[in-house]
Image: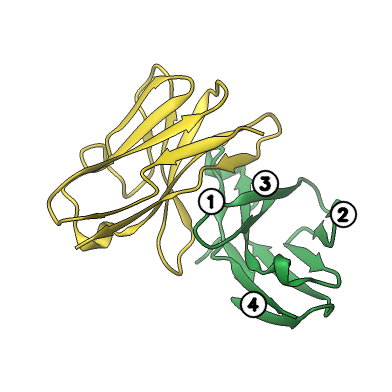
Chain colours: A yellow, B green
Amino acid sequence: SAVISQKPSRDICQRGTSLTIQCQVDSQVTMMFWYRQQPGQSLTLIATANQGSEATYESGFVIDKFPISRPNLTFSTLTVSNMSPEDSSIYLCSVEEGAGEQYFGPGTRLTVT
Amino acid sequence: EDQVTQSPEALRLQEGESSSLNCSYTVSGLRGLFWYRQDPGKGPEFLFTLYSAGEEKEKERLKATLTKKESFLHITAPKPEDSATYLCAVRYGGSQGNLIFGKGTKLSVKP
């Protein structure tokens, strides 16, 4: 299975600032996914990022708040913009492999003060 | 209404005490049910995929089964290292290929 790394692993940010999270995969993949995991809640899909096209956002998530880049087949970034305490969460990227299962990175724990 | 419901929310077992975790789903047109294990501070780790009722998968002390309405993750003679949160997710015809996750069951196994 693909090996996925994320940077940073955690960060504490001030309200109103932005943070960019990086996701690196050790093999070329078509689809990359960004999730949010809030305490006591299900993993929620933010968007799907395909190389060479605009990301597809799920209901409740917008590009202005969560811009995504996908410059090549092994890398993606998610930016959390104009942060508020409600954005405090774990952010995870994942990739899908042959049989449809997804493999996840270690996550980025974000705290907004 | 939640599409994927996991129970119990938390489960405490003694080492060697077998039990089962439940994942019930209300979606139609199931295209796969996925089990994951998540350790604190880490991303979910893929365990199993099940596609049709009656299917079973096994890995060490874990066995996953699937019916038309639910899946069970059976843990036989658990060890403390099995302590983790277990997540299930479904992909179905209306999910546009996306995974819909339950909230998980937090398992603690005491020595």
Mark 1: amino acid: Gly
Left or right: residue A79 versus residue B35 is: left
Residue at mark 2 to residue at mark 1: CA–CA distance: 29 Å
Which comes before the other along the chain, label 2 or label 1? 1
Which is nearer the N-term, disc 4 or disc 3?
4
* Chain containing mark 3: B
Say whether disc 1 or disc 3 marks the residue closer to the N-terminus. Answer: 3
- Please, is residue A90 above or below residue B18 in the view? above
Q: Which residue does the numbered mark 2 point to in the structure image? A: B54
Between marks 4 and 3 in the image, the one whose residue lies nearer the viewer: 4
Mark 2–mark 4 Cα distance, whole angstroms, equals: 22 Å
Residues beneath discs 4 and 3 located on the same chain: yes
Quadrant position of residue B21: bottom right
Q: Is residue B35 left or right of residue A105?
A: right
Which of these two is toward me, B48 or B32? Answer: B48
- Secondary structure beneath dot 1 equals loop
Q: Which residue is most to the front? A: B111
**Total numbered labels:** 4
The answer to whether marks 1 and 4 mark residues whose Cβ atoms lie closer than 8 Å is no
Q: Which of the two residues, A48 or B19, is positioned nearer the viewer here?
A: B19
The quarter of the image holding the C terminus of chain A is: bottom left
Between label 1 and label 4, give the one nearer the viewer: 1
**The N terminus of chain A lies in which quarter of the figure?**
top right
Residue mark closest to the camera, 2 vs 4? 4
Element type at marker 3? loop
Q: Secondary structure at mark 2?
A: loop
Residue placed under numbered mark 3 in the picture: B29
Q: Amino acid at mark 4?
A: Pro
Confirm whether circles 1 and 4 share one chain: yes
Q: Secondary structure at mark 4?
A: loop
Residue type at numbered disc 3 = Gly
> On the image, numbered disc 4 is attached to which residue?
B8
